[in-house]
Image (tube, grey):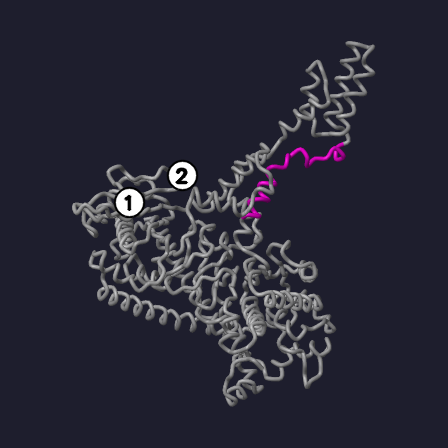
Amino acid sequence: MAAIGITKREELAFRRGVINGKQLTAKEREELMKPFLPLEPIKTSAPSALSQSPKSPKLTQRTTSAPKPKPTPIRTFLHIVLHTVISFVFSIFFRFRRAWRLFSYKVRGVLRHHHHTPEWIVNDVKSVEQLPKHLSVILEHREDDEDQGNAGLEGLVQDVCEIAAWTASAGIPLLSIYERTGVLKNYVPALHAAIQNNLESYFGTRRRPTLTVKAPHTISYSPPGTPSSEPTENGSTTSRPHLTVLLLSEHDGRDTLVDLTVTLATMAQKGDIRKEQIDMNLVNAELSDYVSSEPDLLVLFSPTVVLKGYPPWQLRLTEIFHLPDNKGVNYQVFLKALKKFGKAEFRVGK
Amino acid sequence: MTSLHEHGLSRWIAYSPPVAWTVRQLRELLIGAIKQGPVPQHVAFVMDGNRRFAREHHIETVEGHNMGFEALARILEVCYKAGVKVVTIYAFSIENFKRSKHEVDALMELAKLKLGQLAEHGALLDRYGAAIRILGNRSLVKPDVIEAIDRAVAITANNKRAILNVCFPYTSRDEITTAIKSTVEQFSTPLDSLQTPSKRTFSESHITQQIRKQMLEEDTDGRSGAWESRSASPASMKGAKSVEEGRSSSTSTTINPSDKDETHSATPNYPDPETITAATLNEHMLTAGAPPLDLLVRTSGVERLSDFMLWQCHENTSIVFLKCLWPEFDLWQFLPVLVEWQWQKKKLQEQQKSRAHSKAD
């Protein structure tokens, strides 16, 4: 409150429209507002113009981008200097902050490594009260690596394998992987083999979860020989957990909504559907059947939150997690995301 | 009154005219400085935390919303002075109707009051040049609030310099569904119906009818009267729409008006649905015409979109989640966000430049 540059009397007047216990008239309000209004560049001919009412003073004030009365050279110069100073100071600050954060992430990463053992991961997520049923991640296909060692398709596949293994270890049944270009969709069988291999290195051959890799509009790929449950040597039947990996791309976002609209328009032209029949439930049903359901948690491994074309419809209540300034896939982001999700409270509209 | 319980002395100092004046000048100066760099053209705010603020400061929920409104006023001032063209705020979600009736009513009352006050000062609003637009599902709002909305919107409609989008009551899924629906509607409306027969003096179908009549007269003089009365009536009713039927029926030997109606409805001339693109849908969104969303800010530490601007923010928008509660949100919290946005923007441009260079090499 204190820092907005108004006096006590003015504050009261703005809030309540009262000065010394008297209700203000429109004229008085105008007087009150005068010092706050940016001067009028175009028509100054309306001094009788109504002022703001006490509660909306800033409404009008803010609505303006009106230039200053005279943008004097001194003022402009001052602004430029100040802008330079601010940008400079902040850029140093941002760099230091990034360095510090990266350092602390690295330290934590070393201290709390998962050692490729599902048990460690299970232990890590044990304290998390609720786990997402559908986890989603955004990955990037970069052509050049910035000393991350994850460039190109190979790096991407490697990231997918690791995340899949963590997800399976944590016991989350559905993982959707968004990558803008959709390059992974071209290599579904190969990707399946790679993830399977990695799961094997985590779980061992016998405990390895079964795996399905699929992409929207294609048949899901789960090769034979991966029964969901099989008798163990002891005779007891343990059902192995199952992991579904769903590959999403930019095409599953806006383009799919456009496809849906085209289909609906064609149907409407033939008279197969009435306008009233198109509603949120229909759109939702179509999109969750053909593309993906709403993920509970979306994990970004990028330094800032930019969604890069992630399917919009599905993002409604998704918890979005990112570690500021983090770059590249690592286990700490994954773990922190799950922990944060465990604490989040879900209130729709409340 | 209910504002923060600060110490008497610091409060007294902050409110003393010289300090207040200095702070005001400083704000102006900072805003002016921000303006020197790139400024986001379209900013959206999720004003979250009014209720938690009220709880933490032991004031009424409604009073918390009031303070939130003041914060909004301050932040809008900053935005427009800095040169933001469009500000979109999430004022009320369709899901908010689930809240207690008391609170919903109070919020509606608040909206009505503020919009009403706004409408009283039309002349000043013109000076500032911001147009208010209400984005949302009107069918859910009571008529008296609708009236206040319409008045405020009408009064500011001519302002071109800036836009304030108030999402009320809004959800993004509702918006997308409505956009799909209206697009479907547009593409399932026959093109021909657009040109009414009154626009042209001569109707093609009428000419066809005339020719056919002449042909028939040549053929069978005796029966011509009966044909004329029959064939003229559908033509005059349907006007330009029945071009095709007119042609087809002229070749057929038996003419039956009821048959004609069927053939007509089977072959209307629709626009090609394959021409629908993302741009088409974009035009049907409530934010049509606004520049792409550059920055979305959500306060109170909740990291979710909560059904807000899904279509608009899922591409290249910078999304920022802040810990502070909305009533506390001010220039001092917003300034670092803006500076960081400018910094990232600059970095992005540098990257693109270097990429372009390396490609050229």
Crowding at dot 2, Cα within 10 Å, few <14 / some 14-19 / many 20+, comes out as few
A102 versus A28 height, above or below: above
Per the image, is B124 magenta?
no
Which numbered circle lies on residue A97? none
- Secondary structure beneath dot 2 equals loop
In the rendered structure, the answer to whether residue A310 lies left or right of residue A17 reads: left
| Residue under label 1 | A211
Looking at the rendered structure, the kind of residue marked 2 is His
Is B359 placed left or right of A264 in the picture?
A: left
Provide the chain ID for the residue under circle 2: A
Label 1 crowd bin: few (<14), some (14–19), many (20+), radius 10 Å: many
Q: Which residues are magenta?
A: B177-200
Q: In the displayed structure, would residue A44 be above or below residue A277?
A: below
Q: Which residue matches tag 2? A: A217
- Quick one: label 1 or label 2, which is nearer the N terminus? 1
Residue under the image location 60 percent in, 65 percent down? B101
Q: Hey, which quadrant is residue B218 in on the image?
A: top right
Farthest front residue in view: A235
Decide which of B106, A86 is in the foreground and name it.
B106
Write down the chain letter for disc 1: A
Task: Name the residue located 62 percent from the left edge and 77 percent from the top edge.
Answer: A15
Left or right side of B142 for B295 = left
